[in-house]
Every structure is written in C-alpha cells, then in structure tokens.
Image (cartoon, helix red, strand yellow):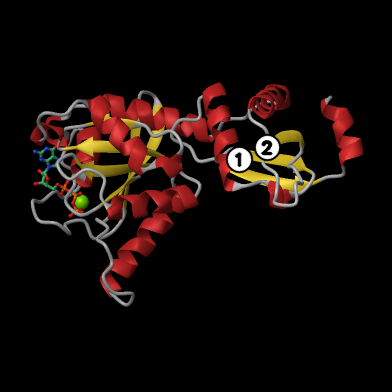
Amino acid sequence: MFLGRPNVGKSSLVNALLGEERVIVDARPGTTRDATDTPLLYDGRRVVLIDTAGLRRRSRVDDGVEYYSTRRAQDALERADVAVLVIDAREGIADQDQRIARMVYEAGRASVIAVNKWDLLSGHTPEQVRRVAQERLRFLGEVLVVPTVATQRRGIEQLMAAVLRAAQARATRIATGPLNRVIAEALGAHNPPADPAGRQLNIYYATQPTTRPPTIVLFVNDPRLFTDGYRRYLERRLREGFDLAGTPLRWVPRRRRPAASARTTR
Ligand SMILES: Nc1nc2c(ncn2[C@@H]2O[C@H](COP(=O)(O)OP(=O)(O)OP(=O)(O)O)[C@@H](O)[C@H]2O)c(=O)[nH]1
Ligand SMILES: [Mg+2]
C-alpha cells in the first residue's frame, strides 16, 4: 500500500506500476479521497496495490476529515504486508512522515521509503538520502530507501524489488539453532544490563514462534531487566545476522526458572 503526506505522488506511483492512468492524479493536494485496491500481476506474482488519501498533520483532535483519512489508512494497513511510505525528495523526512512511519511500525507492517520527485532534487546522492532516512527513522531498524520519479516511471522496478524483499523479511522464520547462536554471541560481546541492586539480566533461550512480523520470545530470569537499550542492541545483532531490512521485530521476554532452561542452552 502507498502512504504519505498529500501530493507526494502516491497515486502517480500506483499508475506507474500499472502502466496506465488508473487512479486520479492532480497537482492539488487532497486528490485521493478513499483507499482504492487494484490487483496487479507483477513478475508472475499477485499483488494488490492500495492507494490512500494523503495524511495531513492533524491540527485539532476533532478535525473530522483528517481523522477519517487516518482511520482508513489504518484499516488499509491491516490488509497490507508492506507499506510504501512516499516522501517528496525536496522536503525530506518531515515530522509527519515520522508519525506515519511509526503507525506502520506499530501495525507490525514492513515498510519501504520511496523518495519520489527525485527529478526535482539536485545535489544529493541516493546514499546521502538513505543515511538521512535511516537517522530520522531509526526506530524502524534498517530502512529500505528507493529514489523514484513516478511521472517518468523511473525507479519503479527497484521499488518493487524492495517491496518484495521487505515482504520476505517480514515473513522470515529464523530456526532456533541459528537464532540462539546469534543471541549467545551478542551476550558474549556485550554484557546484559543490571538493575541498581546489581541483578543482571540472564537470557537462557530464544525462539521465534510466529512471524509477520518475526516475533522473538526470550526466556529470561526477570523480564523487567530487559531494557530498551539491550533490546535495540540485540535487534542490531540479529539484523546483522539475517536479512530483516524493512520489517519490524517483536520481542517478548518471558520469565523462566534458570535451572531447567540453563541446561537447554549450555
Ligand atoms: N516532477 C515530478 N512530479 C511528480 C512526480 N510524481 C508525481 N508528481 C506530480 O505531483 C502531483 C501530485 O501527484 P499525485 O500522484 O496526485 O499525489 P498524491 O500523493 O496521490 O496526492 P493526494 O492524493 O492528493 O494525497 C501531480 O501533479 C503529479 O504529476 C515525480 O516523480 N516528479
Ligand atoms: Mg492520490
């Protein structure tokens, strides 16, 4: 699905993929009113493209129109595997883009950043823009960034390749053996945190019971000792070990008695 602020070129990207003017494009913001689904056979795969209305920053809580476009975007997210967050290359990643990205992340959907209207930006390399996006959207983990020019159908294949890669990352299943090896190496390289009383986090065992997005259950001595900082660290190590670009991960620490579980890992 395609998400983003008004007028960034969401509908134009959908048309570029369809190879025809199927949805309405206009220079004025607020052109698309409702989410529209269009099925497409891409490279032998069935995909459904969902175009959505541009999401403005809501100025007041009771702004009706914006409330409903956000609600509809959230409904569309529930049906989607991957959200393409479309941004205007000239404007970069705005606060509103961060909010939209967070909504995608919290819905457990994969994301790809399309830096559209690339033709109107000069003096920047794709790598520079990728670094800025990675910095501004750090909470996403590892972002996939693709420059596009919807009106010239440039970058469209790269965009779809990134979308398929993100969808695959979101469906990843990491086997228990490799998962525990990465966790054990991470533990060895960087000691888990201790609380003020000196009690240290102990991780006995990890499994990935479900996916879409990948969910890691950690059996630990005390879930309260599993800090955000250590979670981010483990997540980095996991992303180094497996291709998880574009997908969020879920971490579920569970209390387990040490004696029985220690035997299973060591
Ligand atoms: N130069 C340039 N113009 C573009 C590009 N993509 C879209 N546009 C233009 O930007 C304007 C808005 O495009 P739309 O596709 O309607 O944008 P949208 O995000 O769907 O807008 P809303 O539905 O209003 O939220 C149109 O005038 C497009 O022709 C691009 O890559 N380069
Ligand atoms: Mg539109």
Nearest the eye: 34 or 194: 194
Q: Is residue 189 above or below residue 57?
A: above
Picture quarter with the N terminus = top left
Q: Are marks 2 and 1 in contact (CB under 8 Å)?
A: yes
The quarter of the picture where residue 251 lies is: top right
**Whole-number angstrom distance, CA of label 2 to CA of label 1:** 7 Å
Q: Is residue 28 left or right of residue 208?
A: left
Q: Amino acid at mark 1?
A: Tyr
Q: Which residue is mark 2?
A: 192
Residue neighbourhood size for the residue with mark 2, other residues' Cα within 10 Å, grouped as few (<14), some (14–19), many (≥20): many
> Looking at the image, which residue is at 39% across and 34% down?
143
Q: Amino acid at mark 2?
A: Pro
What percent of the width, then of the height, locates residue 110? 45, 40
What percent of the width, then of the height, locates residue 68? 33, 67
> Looking at the image, which residue is at 69% across and 25% down?
188
Residue neighbourhood size for the residue with mark 1, other residues' Cα within 10 Å, grouped as few (<14), some (14–19), many (≥20): some
Q: Is residue 59 above or below residue 265?
A: below
The mark found on residue 230 in the picture is 1
